[in-house]
Amino acid sequence: MRFLTALPVYNEEKYLDEVLPQVASYAQDVLVVDDGSTDRTPEILGRHKTIRTIRHPQNRGYGAGLVTAFEATIQGGYDALITIDCDGQHEPHMIPEMIQRLIDTGVDIVSGSRYLEVSESTPPPPEDRRRINMTVLGWLGQELGLRMTDGFCGFKAYRARILSDFKIVDLGYAMPLEVWVQAVEHRMKIVEMAVPLIYLDETRSFGGSLDNSEFRLIHYRHVFDAALARSGLDKSIRSKPL
């Protein structure tokens, strides 16, 4: 299976030199989508000659980086796409395992889960992020029939054939909610794969008012409701577990 591995980045100067060589050692074709970084990210990326870069002239949002990765996968004729964050919270050595899981299961999406296998020795995540994740998982279960343990992990594998079905409107951090709604709408098959729970920067900003967890949850609900309204899904479809 020929696959592209894509990293959406924004002001990641302190992680690039460590993470990119690791990713490149486990993936043949690597794409970095630089979402208008204003730090030394473009300079550092320029030194990694074997890694392709697409740069957004201005910061558009986390979801925008993923949409660009979707487009690059389709245009490049790849069979699959791996997405992985560049902030050190995902482990590149798991890329081959994730793509193999996609092949073996025959599903459309393999979604990393930081909560599928958690031991007592695992450090707890930031409380507000865990609370929001649990709330969103409730929405996904009750209204879409999705039984999942992690709604926001950026470490995923997608079959290329499904990527053109996604019509993403929200280009920020709420973008995964649109992915889940549209995945159910198009009857995509999804499995989770356990990945380590790692938070290196608990103070990482979501940008502006989204740093307030209550406002962020309200925003997520608004995006989720809008995605449901656009989807054409009815309640009888939503209630059937996938």
Image (cartoon, rainbow, N blue to C red):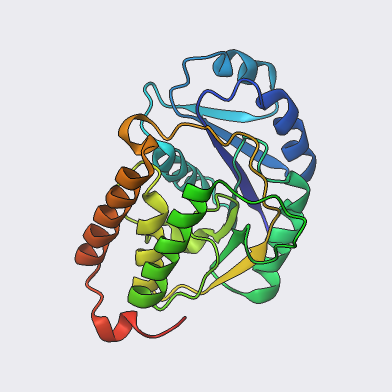
Depth order, front residue of 27/16: 16
Quarter holding residue 181: bottom left
Image position of 178 (left or right of 4): left
Residue at 50% from the left image edge and 27% from the top image edge? 10
Q: Give me the residue at 62% from left, 75% from top.
A: 106
State the residue at coordinates (67%, 41%).
29
Vertical arrangement, residue 58 with respect to residue 6, above or below: above
* Whether residue 168 is visible: no
- In x, y percent, where is residue 95? 72, 52
Q: Residue drawn at (51%, 54%), measured in percent from left and top? A: 130
Depicted 113 relative to depicted 67: above or below: below
29 left or right of 68 in image: right
Residue 67 visible? The answer is: yes
Looking at this view, is 101 or 174 the one in front? 174
Which residue is more in the foreground, 50 or 186?
A: 186
Relative placement, left or right, of 134 versus 26 is left
Give the position of the N terminus as an image quadrant. Answer: bottom right
Does 120 appear above or below 148?
above
Residue 4 horizontal/vertical position (percent): 61, 47
Q: In the figure, 189 relative to 156: above or below?
A: below
- How far across and down, in percent of the image, does residue 91 sit? 73, 46
Give how far across and how far down residue 32 sits, in percent. Answer: 57, 33
